[in-house]
Amino acid sequence: MFIRQSAESVERQILPKASADGARKSEMLATRALSLVGKRAISTSVCVRGGHGVAKVEEYTLPAYFDRPDNPLPDIRYVQSLSAEQQSLKEKEKGSWAALSNEEKLALYRISFNQSFAEMKKASGEWKSVLGGVFFFIGFTGLVVLWQRKYVYGPVPHTFDPEYKAKELQRMLDMRISPVEGFAANWDYENKQWKK
Amino acid sequence: MAHPSQLGFQDAASPLMEELLHFHDHALMIVLLISVFVLYIIVTMITAKLTDKLILDSQEIEIIWTVLPAIVLIMIALPSLRILYLMDEINDPHLTIKAMGHQWYWSYEYTDYDDLGFDSYMIPTQDLAPGQFRLLEADHRMVIPMESPIRVLISAEDVLHSWAVPSLGVKVDAVPGRLNQTTFIVNRPGVFYGQCSEICGANHSFMPIVIEAVPLAHFENWTSLMMEDA
């Protein structure tokens, strides 16, 4: 559906057609101009529909920069438009690297990359905020529960009175509820106490 | 009945429930092993320092993690099916009782004994004697002889109910117009509680089932007394 064209053929279509010589000259100039910036800096895939012209190029289809530890070499440099100083540094890079000072090497690195591996992998303190938020909301929920108990719920049935509970407990033991390994199994009937 | 804050099953009062307890231990152990293993894998994956983006497939591990789960499933299925068929074994019940669910009480008919039948209503909280269990006690208990196979035919007179007694390993739906059968043997004397297990209206939580298992002589005394009263 989409025809992928090279930068050269795009230029051929966009630039006006002069004489054969002139056209070829302007082609060559345009291609050279493009290659200075780097072919990857502009889209090398352009959508052409029915020969009528170029459709809009979506940003997400263009090569992008990213910092990822598992994908260490992004498609493009970090700094696309170089200042004059950076451009001269790039020229110097074409010579011997031993001639570069440490600061220059660092500057070259920062042109190509945003974060270093150390910076990428550095732990953030985000977990503290998350945990703090969690505790805060749990505490708030506790307040809500306390408020409910005081202002919403009625009294519990009389069967929750301690004396009633004691009678229930005695009755459960007398009835030998779960005598195998459950409830009554843990009661020492000889000495009338819980088994140690 | 369960003691407060009980998490596990009640002690079994019938052989089938004992089998179910053992099976549950077996299945839970497998489940715990799998969960711990998966948790370990998750933790190692997250804390791993290295990444390999270029793995496409691996036949060996695919085979292992297909075959091993299949074996685990078979190890779970075999005991499970054994118990399933055990439940349907032909046995020769000594006694047949009909348990009918109503809104909101159970009625029991001992038609082996000339028309012995009675309703079993929950004892309301305000009428409890000291020490009785709230929402569990009933005015008339279903008394049965212990160590005898009992057949219970369960149905309902109005809406769906469910007749459940956890310590015997019994839960059977009471469907209006349908007769469901269950059999069990109670190993030991005692009182065993259950609650209606199918939503049936406002008082669904207030129609408990109480079974009292007694030696045969006591059971015969009880039936004589009940028929005298009737």
Image (cartoon, rainbow, N blue to C red):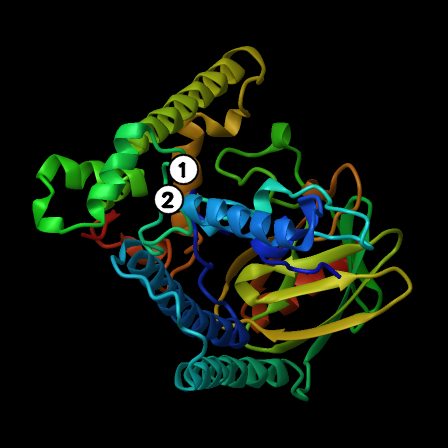
Same chain, labels 1 and 2: yes
Give the image location of residue B16, x and y in percent.
54, 76
- The vertical placement of A135 against A14, above or below, is above
Mark 2, chain letter?
Answer: A
**Residue lying furthest bottom in this view?**
B90
Disc 2 marks which amino acid? Arg
What residue does disc 1 label?
Answer: A80
Q: Which mark is residue B8?
A: none
Q: Is disc 1 in contact with disc 2, using a CB cutoff of under 8 Å?
A: yes
Residue B92 seen by the camera: yes
- The vertical placement of A179 against B180, above or below, is above
Q: Please name whichever residue, A192 or A99, is drawn nearer the observer in this view of the structure.
A: A99
Q: Residues within 10 Å of mark 2 (few under 14, many from 20)?
A: some
Disc 1 marks which amino acid? Gln
Q: Residues within 10 Å of mark 1 (few under 14, many from 20)?
A: few
Residue at 54% x, 82% y is B77
Give the image location of residue A107, x and y in percent.
21, 36
- Tell me if A138 is positioned left or right of B134 in this view: left
What residue does disc 2 label?
Answer: A77
Q: Please name whichever residue, B9 or A2, is drawn nearer the observer in this view of the structure.
A: A2
Give the image location of residue A72, x and y in percent.
32, 54
- The secondary structure type at the circle numbered 2 is loop
| Figure quadrant of the N terminus of chain A | bottom right
Residue B195 seen by the camera: no
- Tell me if A49 is positioned left or right of B151 in this view: right
Residue at 31% x, 34% y is A127
- The vertical placement of B36 against B123, above or below, is below
- The secondary structure type at the circle numbered 1 is loop
